[in-house]
Amino acid sequence: MFDEFLKKAEELRGRDEPFAVATVVRSEPPVSGKPGDRAIIRADRSIWGWIGGGCAQPTVIMESLRAISDGKPRLIRISPASQQAEEGVVAYKMECHSGGALDIYIEPVLPKPALVIIGRSPVARTLAKLALNLEYAVTVISPLAATDAFPVGIRILTDASIDDVKTTPKTYVVVSTQGEDDEEGVELALGIGASYTGFVASRTKGEKVIGYLREKGLSPDLLERVKYPAGLDIGAASPEEIALSILAEIVKLKSRKSEPESAAALHDNRKPPSSQAASFASTAPSTEVKDPVCGMTVDVGSARHRSEYQSTSVYFCCARCKESFDKDPARFAARA
């Protein structure tokens, strides 16, 4: 079973698909989940594996989606007893549970951040090496890139369009053409629609390129998303220092809890997001309500159990709660 689990996880990683691993680390009987039980939860809310049935599963799915969304692991406790908040533990009171308790550790597994470098300049080559060492998935786009000494492990595209680049919220683009088709490079970068679009150029050169693209008909709002000169202002002069300043700026952006407004706006005026990017972005939980029977939080968008009572939809975490409600709805009506 463990071999199958590893195979499934590796399959998803091979597709650069985000998912979360939930592992039972502690249990108090009677519960069906036991320490060592584990499951994979995908961004589409599907679950593969076993961590316990009943109300535990929708709770784990909901917290897994949050982990995929914010990139942070968490430890959750599911118990029928009311508990005080404990540091580092997300506690859920589950009255419909079998009577035992479960502690489940949830860890997100996300694709590597992606860096797309357009150009083959000395800054481009140095930036590619630095990003590769920091475990970025690096792609270089340049008609002549194959003739340059880029490190092994970097994807080289000599004839590319935006359809050749997968885009997620963790995709960053740097144009480092430095005299070789600058305008075309910036236009291609904007079409990719990444969280960051940097242009290695002086402010004077950058303004000329942006002015050309504006006259060509590109949206002013779109052109405002180009950061030039690319990188933090650390007084960089050499290709190595410039590359370092750019990567530092990307790391700073990546570490923020949410994208800045200018980066979030990149989803406008660009190609439709790939299915991968769409699934990544759709992991945030939708409207949540409380199950009137057990008190568990239920995600309306994915709830499989629902009843109608007095022209109102009532949602449940499991079939058992729905059955209890349907037998005596008046008893739970106030909670609903």
Image (spheres, helix red, strand yellow):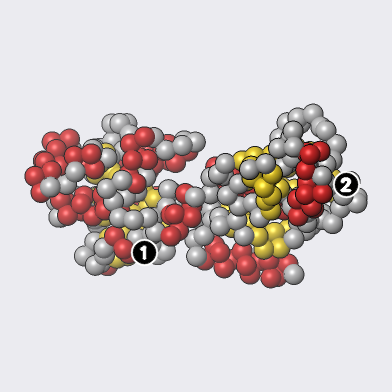
* Residue shown at 87% from the left, 49% from the top: 98
Compared across the picture, whether 180 is left or right of 45 comes to: left
| Residue 217 vertical placement versus 5 (above, below) | above
Q: Amino acid at mark 2?
A: Gly
Residue 151 visible: no
First-in-chain label (1 vs 2): 2
Residue 261 can be seen, yes or no = yes
User: Is disc 2 surrounded by few (<14), some (14 to 19) or many (20+) residues within 10 Å?
Assistant: some
Where in the figure is residue 11, as x and y percent of width and height? 57, 68
The residue lying furthest to the front in this view is 310
Give the residue type that dot 1 points to: Arg
**Which residue does the numbered mark 1 point to in the structure image?**
155
Q: Which residue is mark 2?
A: 100
Circle 2: element type: loop
Q: Is residue 227 above or below residue 155?
A: above
On residue 231, which mark appears? Answer: none
Which x, y percent locates residue 286? 55, 44
Judging depth in this view, the residue of 288 and 138 nearest the camera is 288
Q: Where residue 308 sits: x, y (%)? A: 67, 47
User: In terms of depth relative to the viewer, which is nearer, 329 or 97?
Assistant: 329
Q: Quadrant of residue 240?
A: top left
Badge 1 density bin: few <14, some 14–19, many ≥20, Cα 10 Å = some
Residue found 81% across the figure and 38% down from its top: 331
